[in-house]
Image: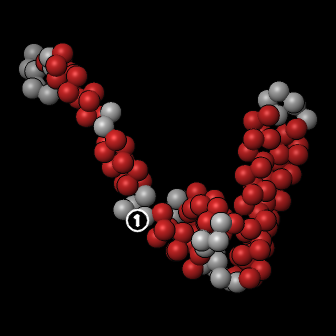
């Protein structure tokens, strides 16, 4: 049987420690996050999101729709314990998405997440920046 130098069977305990310390470094996680974000900063994502949400009606619809969707998530989780709560969570979730698509009808552009799934999470950051006067 041939063993490769980097094969787990041939590693010494101090090699495992070194590997574990590399993984636990903040830079390791930062690199993963940067790869997921496509090398763009938070501000760049928000700016691109904002550029495709210029129509005032679309901005209002997103300002209402995004928190409505966000509110539905903890309600869905709470519905594990309170069984009829899922109906309200579903209604809020659907209403939030209706707001989003009505807004995009006024904008005349498809939602950004049709092109890149990561924009599903940028909408929340845009909304947060907007309510804090930064978007």
| Of the pair 3 and 54, the residue shown nearer to us | 54
SS assignment at label 1: loop
Q: Decide: few, some or many residues near mark 1? Use Cα within 10 Å; few <14, some 14-19, many ≥20.
A: few
Q: Position of residue 6 (x, y in %)?
A: 14, 28
Q: Which quarter of the figure is the N terminus placed in? A: top left
Q: Identify the residue at horizontal 88%, vertical 43% (top origin).
A: 87
Q: Identify the residue at horizontal 88%, vertical 38% (top origin).
A: 85
| Of the pair 43 and 74, the residue shown nearer to us | 43
Q: Residue furthest front?
A: 132
Q: Identify the residue at horizontal 73%, vertical 77% (top origin).
A: 58
Q: Is residue 123 above or below residue 8?
A: below
Q: Residue furthest right?
A: 84
Left or right of 39, for residue 13: left
Question: Can residue 24 be seen in the rendering of this structure?
Answer: yes
Q: Identify the residue at horizontal 87%, vertical 30% (top origin).
A: 82
Q: Position of residue 20 (x, y in %)?
A: 27, 27
| Of the pair 27 and 89, the residue shown nearer to us | 27
- Which residue does the numbered mark 1 point to in the structure image? 40
Q: Position of residue 4 (x, y in %)?
A: 10, 25
Left or right of 89, for residue 127: left
Q: Quadrant of residue 38?
A: bottom left
Q: How many marks?
A: 1
Q: Is residue 23 above or below residue 13?
A: below
Q: How is the image coloured?
A: secondary structure
Q: Quadrant of residue 117?
A: bottom right
Question: Can residue 7 be seen in the rendering of this structure?
Answer: no
Q: Which quarter of the figure is the C terminus placed in? A: bottom right
Q: Is residue 119 above or below residue 52?
A: above
Q: Position of residue 111 (x, y in %)?
A: 63, 70
């Amino acid at each position: 049987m041939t063993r490769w130098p980097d094969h787990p069977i041939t590693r010494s305990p101090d090699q495992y420690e070194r590997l574990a310390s590399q993984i636990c470094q903040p830079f390791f996680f930062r690199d993963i996050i940067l790869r997921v974000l496509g090398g763009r900063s938070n501000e760049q994502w928000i700016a691109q999101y904002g550029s495709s949400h210029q129509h005032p009606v679309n901005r209002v619809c997103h300002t209402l729709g995004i928190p409505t969707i966000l509110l539905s998530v903890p309600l869905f989780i709470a519905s594990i314990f309170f069984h009829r709560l899922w109906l309200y969570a579903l209604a809020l979730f659907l209403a939030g998405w209706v707001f989003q698509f009505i807004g995009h009808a006024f904008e005349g552009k498809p939602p950004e997440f049709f092109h890149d799934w990561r924009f599903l999470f940028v909408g929340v950051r845009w909304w947060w920046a907007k309510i804090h006067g930064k978007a």
